[in-house]
């Protein structure tokens, strides 16, 4: 199956700094990338949808100025957590659509962010 | 946000036992139900994508059924092995989702020798 590579897998940063998470589709072109986060004992929740070449759409309650998404190419989408705070500590994971949307979904390995 | 419920939250079985998990979901505007197997530090691995009411799919010792009218799916593992230990996620797509998945919290399975 298709491969999505997500980096870093784990990051610890100081409060107030910014962290960039990258997701690359290695062997296919991902026109759409979804970003999810998971808090402890909760389900993966959709944060935003990123489409190549256009602005991302954010779910209710997700601050677009805090979680900057860039999808400048068909193989790379990035999520930048700006001015991170301890409450942003979470697990973040990306998902790309395959050629058959709805029946194919390809995930990165996830990023564990800890803000101290 | 669609309410997708999985039970049990966790399960501990002995090697050789058969087990099953439940995923329940709102049946309106159903499009597809995905099952994933997820190990720590790895990408979720797709097990099944189910679209038709009454569907039953099988992959080795793992099988799944789907009832879209009543809004549930079962995942079965026959003769559990330690390597089956993982978190099993179900995720719903409905026709309003725009292809984003609505996940349950997962069932964490531990199989001990």
Image (cartoon, coloured by chain):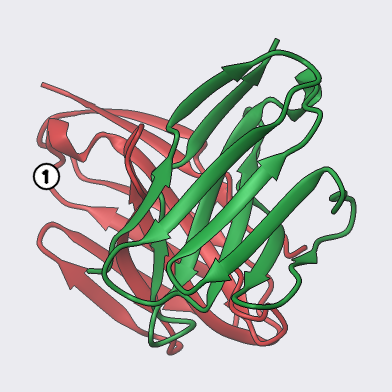
Chain colours: A green, B red
Above or below, A65 relative to A87: below
Residue A4 position in % (x across, y down) = 36, 58
Residue at image mark 1: B79
Residue A72 position in % (x across, y down) = 58, 68
Count the marks.
1
Return the residue found at the far top: A116
The quadrant where residue B82 appears? top left
Above or below, B110 relative to A95: above
- Depth order, front residue of B9/B89: B89
Can you see residue B45?
A: yes
Can you see residue B101?
A: no
Position of the N terminus of chain B by quadrant: bottom right
Q: Measuring 45% from the left and 74% from the top, which residue is drawn there?
A: A30
Residue B77 position in % (x across, y down) = 22, 51
- Element carrying mark 1: loop
- Depth order, front residue of B13/A84: A84
Residue B16 position in % (x across, y down) = 10, 36
Position of the C terminus of chain B by quadrant: top left
Direction from residue A106 to residue A35 in the image, left or right:
right
Q: Measuring 48% from the left and 73% from the top, which residue is drawn there?
A: B33
Direction from residue A86 to residue B21 in the image, left or right:
left
Name the chain letter of the residue that bears numbered label 1: B
Above or below, A44 relative to A46: above
- Depth order, front residue of B21/A62: A62
Direction from residue A108 to residue B62 in the image, left or right:
left
Q: Measuring 38% from the left and 31% from the top, which residue is drawn there?
A: B11
Q: Measuring 43% from the left and 89% from the top, which residue is drawn there?
A: B52
Direction from residue A106 to residue A116 in the image, left or right:
right
Return the residue found at the far front: A72
Residue neighbourhood size for the residue with mark 1, other residues' Cα within 10 Å, grouped as few (<14), some (14–19), many (≥20): some
């Amino acid at each position: 199956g298709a491969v999505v590579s997500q980096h870093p897998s784990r990051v610890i940063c100081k409060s107030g700094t910014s962290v960039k998470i990258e997701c690359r589709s290695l062997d296919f072109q991902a026109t759409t990338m979804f970003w999810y986060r998971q808090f402890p004992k909760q389900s993966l929740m959709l944060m935003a949808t990123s489409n190549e070449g256009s602005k991302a759409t954010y779910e209710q309650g997700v601050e677009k100025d805090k979680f900057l998404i860039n999808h400048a190419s068909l193989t790379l989408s990035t999520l930048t957590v700006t001015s991170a705070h301890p409450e942003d500590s979470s697990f973040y994971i990306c998902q790309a659509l395959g050629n058959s949307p709805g029946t194919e979904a390809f995930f990165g390995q996830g990023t564990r962010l800890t803000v101290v | 946000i669609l309410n997708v419920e999985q039970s049990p939250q966790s399960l501990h079985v002995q090697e050789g036992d058969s087990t099953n998990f439940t995923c329940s979901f709102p049946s309106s505007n159903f499009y597809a139900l995905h099952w994933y197997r997820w190990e720590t530090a790895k990408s979720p691995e797709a097990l099944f994508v189910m679209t038709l009411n009454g569907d039953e799919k099988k992959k080795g010792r793992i099988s799944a059924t789907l009832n879209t009218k009543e809004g549930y799916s079962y995942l079965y593992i026959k003769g559990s092995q330690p390597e089956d230990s993982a978190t099993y996620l179900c995720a719903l797509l409905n026709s309003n989702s725009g292809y984003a998945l609505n996940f349950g919290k997962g069932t964490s399975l531990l199989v001990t020798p």
